[in-house]
Image (cartoon, helix red, strand yellow):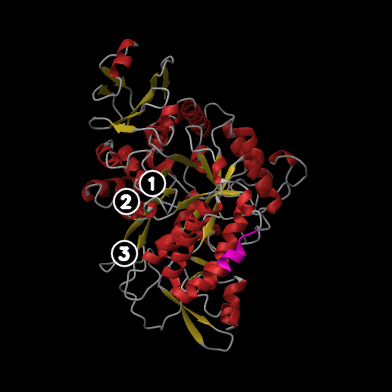
Amino acid sequence: MNESRLKKIEDLLVFLYGREQGARTFDALLRLIPRGLAQSGPAAHREPLSEKDACLIAYGDILSPSSGSSPNGEEAPNSDEDGAGGGASPTALARLRGFLERRNRGSFSYLHILPFHPYSSDDGFSIINYRKIAPHLGTWGDIAPLAREYRLVFDLVLNHGSVQSPWFQSFLKDEPSHRDWYITRPADFDVSPVFRPRTQPLLTPFLREDGTTVSVWTTFSADQVDYNFANPEVLLEFIKIFFEYIQHGARMVRLDAVAYIWKEDGTSCIHHPKTHAIVKLLRALIDCLELDVLILTETNVPHEENLSYFGEGDEAHLVYNFALPPLTLHAAVSEDAGPLRDWARTLPAPGEGPVFFNFLASHDGVGVLPTKGLIDDTSFQKTLDAVLERGSLLSYKDTRSGPMPYEINCSYLSAVAPPSLGTAEERARTFLCCHAVLFALAGLPAVYFHSWIGSEQWTEGPRLYGYRRAINREKPRIDRVEAALSDAHSLRAAVYAGFEKMLAFRRNEGPFAPEVPQKILPATGPVFALARGPDRGGRYVLCLQNFGARPAEYRLAELPALEILARQGIGSEIPLSPRETRWIGYGGGRAMSVLRI
C-alpha cells in the first residue's frame, strides 16, 4: 500500500480522535482490512463513467407477487413466472431480477438496491442488523447474481439505526460493549443551535433495564437512534461493514444522511469538519487499496453546501444534484425554464472534478431546501400550490421561526403531468421532457423505478402507513405492471417507451459522457437548451426541451460547430411542439441523428 496514502488515513484519524487515540485507531483499522480486498477490483481496471451508464433506483421488494401480497409487500405464494426461474416461490430480489431481465434492455448499468436489511421503520432506513438480508427479500445469495449483472449501489446508513438493533438493546442494558455507542444528553439540553430536518423532538427518552431513563439523540425519528462517532469503536465497526459491502459486490456506496453524523454541542451539528473528515477517510481507504468503488453522498441541503462534499477531489466521487428535481419541477409546472437555465450555468465544468448524480425522483420526496436563493419565493410558492392541488403532500422541518416546507411528497409523474393535461401520450411527453434535462446534463443519470414504469401517486399509501413519503413507495403486483407495459395505449407503456428511446439515443452519443463539455445556451420562456461536446471524436449533441403548453421556437445562437448543422440543412430557427424534446447529434464524421419525443 502506498505510504503517502496510509499517512493520510492516519492523519485523518488523528484529526478525529487526537494523536494517541488516533494512532491506536489507525493500527486497529489496518487489522480490519480483509486479506485480498485490494485485489478484488483494482481501480486501475475501473472503466470511467460513460454515456452508456445510467442507474436504476429500486427497493428489493418494489414488485409484489402476481397472486397478491400483504399491505407491506411481504411474500405470498406465486408462480415462477414472477421471478428469474428456479423455484415455485422466488424471493422478492429474484422477482426484481426477473423483471429486469425482461425489461431492462441496456438502459441501466448501475442498480441501487435501497436498504435490504432487517428494519423496523422508514422502509429500510431504520436498520436492525447491517449484516443480514431481510427474510422477505431473500439472502446474500440473491444479491450475488445481481452483482454479476450490474454495478450495485448499497446504502451505508451511518447516522442512525433501529432501536430494535442488538447494539441499542445492549446499550439499554448498560453493557460495556455498547455503553458509548449512542449520543445522550440531559433532558433539558438546549437544542436550539441544532439544525433540525424534522419537527419531532431531537431527544427521545428511553427506559434502561435498571429502571433509569436516558435521553438519546434522534435526528430523524424516535425509532432511529444516532450513533456516536466520537467513539472510534463505532467508526471501526462501520468501516468493517463498508469492507463487507464491497466483498458482497457494492461498486458504489451511498452515504445516507451523512451531513449529520458528527455532533458537537454549541454548533448546528450539520456539515461538521469531522463529518467531512470521515467522508475523506472512506475515500482515502478506497484510494489506498485501489478499490473499484465510488462514494456517493446524500446531503439534501442548499446547493452550495451540497457541493462541499466534493471536497478538493478527496471526498465523494459523486454528489446528488439536489437542486435539479425542484428546479425541473418548477419549469414543468410554471412553464418557465428561467431559474433552471440560470442555475445550470453555475454548475462546475464537466471533467474538472467529481460527477453529479443527476436525478428527479427517488424513494424520498422532492427537496425544497436546495432551491434556496435559486427561485423567487413567490413564484415557487405558486408551484407548491399547484402540485398540492394535484394531490402532492408537503413535509415540514423545524426552524426558529416555526415549521417550514422541507420536501414535496409526490409521484413526480403526477406532479408534473396530471390527468388534466390530456391523453396518456401528452402526459408522458411532459414527464419525459423533464427527464430529457436529467439525461442531457453532465453526470450519471439515475431513475427511480416508479418513474421508469410510469407510476402515479399511491394516494392510499400515506393513509395506510401514516407518513407522507409512502405516496411514492407503492409495491404494485408484477402481473398488473407487466400487463400495463404491454398495453401500447397505457400511460405506463408510453413512459417506458420514451425512456427506452432516450437512453438508447444517449448510449450511442459520446458527447453525453460525464467529462464532455456542456454549454447552457441562450433561450427564453419555457425552452431549456444545452449543447454537449465535442467528445474525442469531434461529435456534438444539441438538446432542446420545451416545457410550455404552446409551440415555441429556438433560435440557434452561440452553438458550438453551428456550421456543421447548417451544412446538414438545419435552419437558424427550430420549431418545438408543446412539451417537445428534440436532440440532434452532429459532427465527428458521422451522420446527423435526431430524437423527437
The residue that disc 3 covers is 403
Q: Earlier in the sequence, mark 3 or mark 2?
A: 2
Which residue lies at the image location 52% right of the left edge and 34% below the top edge?
Answer: 492
- The residue lying at 55 percent from left, 64 percent from top is 238
Query: Which badge, 1 or 2, comes first in the chain's sequence?
Result: 2
- How dense is the environment of label 3, judged by Cα within 10 Å: few (below 14), some, or many (20 and up)? few
Asked where in the image residue 186 lies, by quadrant, the reply is bottom left
In terms of secondary structure, where does tag 1 sit? loop
Query: Magenta span covers which residues?
Result: 28-34
Where the N terminus falls, by quadrant?
Answer: bottom right
Q: Which mark is residue 547?
A: none
**Dominant secondary structure, magenta:** helix
Residue 568 left/right relative to 72:
left
Q: Residue 321, labelled with which disc?
A: 1
Q: Are marks 1 and 2 in contact (CB under 8 Å)?
A: no
Residues packed near mark 1 inside 10 Å, few (<14), some (14 to 19) or many (20 plus): many
**Residue 145 rendering spot, x and y as whole percentages:** 68, 44
Q: Amino acid at mark 3?
A: Pro
Q: How far is disc 1 from disc 3 in space, using C-alphas?
A: 25 Å
